[in-house]
Image (spheres, grey):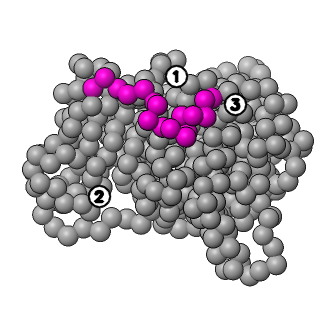
Amino acid sequence: MRMYDILIKKRNGGALSDAEIRFLVKGFTEGRIPDYQMASFLMAVWFRGMTKEETVSLTLAMAESGGKLDLSGIKGIKVDKHSTGGVGDKTTLIIGPILASLQVPVAKMSGRGLGHTGGTIDKLESIPGFCTSIATDVFIRNVNQIHFALAGQTADLAPADKKIYALRDVTGTVDSDALIASSIMSKKIASGADAIVLDVKCGTGGFMKTPAEAERLAELMVEIGRLAGRKTVAVISDMNEPLGRMVGNSLEVVEAVEILSGAGDGRLRELCIQLAAEMLLLSGRLGGEEEKDQRKQAVDMVTDAIVSRRALHKFAEFVEAQGGDPDYIRNPDRFEKASYVVPVPAVKSGRLTACDAEEVGMTSLILGAGRSRKDEAVDFSAGIELRKKLGDTVQEGETMAYLYTNRKDVIPEAISRFQKAYTIENREFEPEKVIKKIIS
């Protein structure tokens, strides 16, 4: 078998066999296939696409390119959740404790933020002492005892994906449905999940900008999950504005505590309840009733976990188990405050009718809350507190948001960038629903 023949076949629109795909993934991971040939393959895929069968083969080959997380020591069905990325997305901080309080095992692998999107690990590490570098036996023990543990992705987990993504990033082949789907699903499968709930973001702050793009990707990933033997559900959710009212690391932990205390932003709460309910349904904990009745029962159980504050207590327990100070969950006022808290005034009167959520995320980045390089440090106290949402009316000079930063020199640029992210018009406007569609 030769890489040259595989390239010609894909260039001409042919469907590759499972053996051919495994040959190229293994060869590239081990360094026998050079970057320029893999780059050529990626461009051929971008132009020609892949069949579902090819995409499944690529996904499984990448998942098997390194070590797999063995979660057989965890009792019950392990349900994982993956978001395709957004601004202000702190759903894992809320959903994990909810499910753990319902005794559903959540064994979560998460990453750090890069660019306009935040990372779950950065948010949790804003809690003093919290550690995501925990041994596998401790990880499994915590899931069995507390029902929730979270760690960073290990270096040998789907290494082919890491190498391939680095090439996609510099060859203009990131936006391929087959390559996106195989990248996401290979990591989820290698992480040992039995069932997967996907939160596919759609809008200005998400990777998929239109509902049609999001639905196409969601359907493909659900089909990959099914063909790979994983129960998979996708929830398409709105990302035309930041999720919730806080953007930034410790700020988002504070907002997660608000939601788990029964308060907070309605859209964020609605999405978290739905995602948690879908995960509860896949856990096998509910049985016997019709699907409609099961769904209502799942929503009721999730809601009760919030109202009773059992999920909030579980959040503190989870933090303590991973070395963090649980008092920051019980008393979030303890989080360190930024040196500068700056109001952003509306430039004119009217109604907020559009938001470039990616620009809001980039504003948070220059305030210090994000990173433009993987090795860059983040400021846990930096970020944005939103005071207005799409559909709200504002008066000229009224405060739309507060910027939190320790970088005095970036404040003028951050104010200007945030103001330009919003469109203010004198017309009626109804914001998008936070949940667009559920695909199962």
Displayed quadrant of residue 142: top right
Instruction: Give left or right: position of 46 versus 191.
Output: left
In the picture of the structure, the residue carrying the numbered disc 2 is 390
| Residue 41 in view of the camera | no
Q: Amino acid at mark 1?
A: Lys
Displayed quadrant of residue 428: bottom left
Q: Earlier in the sequence, mark 2 or mark 3?
A: 3
* Element under disc 2: loop
In the picture of the structure, the residue carrying the numbered disc 3 is 322
Instruction: Give left or right: position of 288 versus 352.
Output: right
* Element under disc 3: loop
Marks 1 and 2 close (CB-CB < 8 Å): no
Task: Please provide percent x and percent y for residue 1.
Answer: 82, 33
In the picture of the structure, the residue carrying the numbered disc 1 is 374
**Residue nearest the observer in this picture, 136 or 324:** 324
User: What residue appears at the point 54 percent right and 34 percent down from the top-left corner?
Assistant: 328
Q: Amino acid at mark 2?
A: Leu
Q: Residues within 10 Å of mark 1 (few under 14, many from 20)?
A: few
* Element under disc 1: loop
Displayed quadrant of residue 235: bottom right
